[in-house]
Amino acid sequence: MAIQKVNIQQAFYDVLIERDFDNFTALQLRDAVGATSQEKRKVIELRKLVYRTLNRLINKGLIVKDHACEGKKPVYLKTASFDTANWHILDHITNDTPQSISEGTTEWLNERLEQCESDFIACLSEFETYKDLCKQAPHLNAKLQDVRSKAREQSSRLLGEIRALKIAMSIS
């Protein structure tokens, strides 16, 4: 398999690669990234950033989400391809001056679009999994209805964001 080029922010690189963070929960990653990050973010923004990053790494096959026990928080584990990935630290790149404002904006919009599309795919996959689980185990239908609805709503929001970003890219 070819080595993947993976964009990652400096704070996540410091925690996941430099500190060799493995077998962690999203909350543990949020706290570790928050402690190492130079820029202070609100807890809600940081939580969203952590989940977006985790979903992107899951979609690329670099980490897996392990649902250990019911009622416990899922644990994230690195895969073999994590160590072979070609890490591209975003914070170092943003120091480069773009050729023009338009190029910088387009690059930023492209990165955001890529992230939204990745999150959208993860959300759709989650929704489809709930749907399949309800078909295979009808007794779970009532218990999974709320989370299934939330996954559907999230995918709709992400689809709207993707459309808006594509329109913004077409006019920039």
Image (spheres, helix red, strand yellow):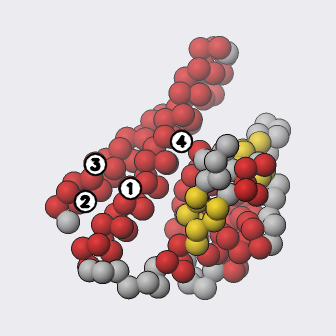
In the image, residue 96 above or below residue 74: below
Mark 1 or mark 3, whichever is nearer to me: 1
For residue 124, side relative to residue 8 (left or right): left
Mark before the other along the chain sequence, 3 or 2: 3
- Give the quarter of the image for residue 143: top right
Residue carrying label 1: 113
In space, the residues marked 1 and 3 are separated at their CA atoms by 9 Å
Discs 1, 2 touching: Cβ within 8 Å? yes
Residue carrying label 3: 163
Discs 1, 3 touching: Cβ within 8 Å? no
In space, the residues marked 2 and 4 are separated at their CA atoms by 23 Å
- Give the quarter of the image for residue 51: bottom right
In space, the residues marked 3 and 2 are separated at their CA atoms by 10 Å
For residue 50, side relative to residue 127 (left or right): right
Residue type highlighted by circle 2: Met
Helix or strand or loop: what does disc 2 sit on? Answer: helix
In space, the residues marked 3 and 4 are separated at their CA atoms by 17 Å
Q: Position of residue 165 (x, y in %)?
A: 29, 56
Residue carrying label 4: 122
Asked whether 140 or 165 is in front, the reply is 165
Q: Quadrant of the N terminus?
A: top right
Q: Residue at x 76, y 48 (%)?
A: 79
Residue type highlighted by circle 1: Leu
Checking the image for residue 169, the label placed there is 2
Circle 1: is it few (<14), some (14-19), or many (20+) Cα within 10 Å?
A: many
In space, the residues marked 1 and 2 are separated at their CA atoms by 9 Å
Q: Residue furthest front?
A: 2
Q: Residue furthest left?
A: 171
Q: Residue at x 49, y 35 (%)?
A: 124
Discs 2, 4 touching: Cβ within 8 Å? no
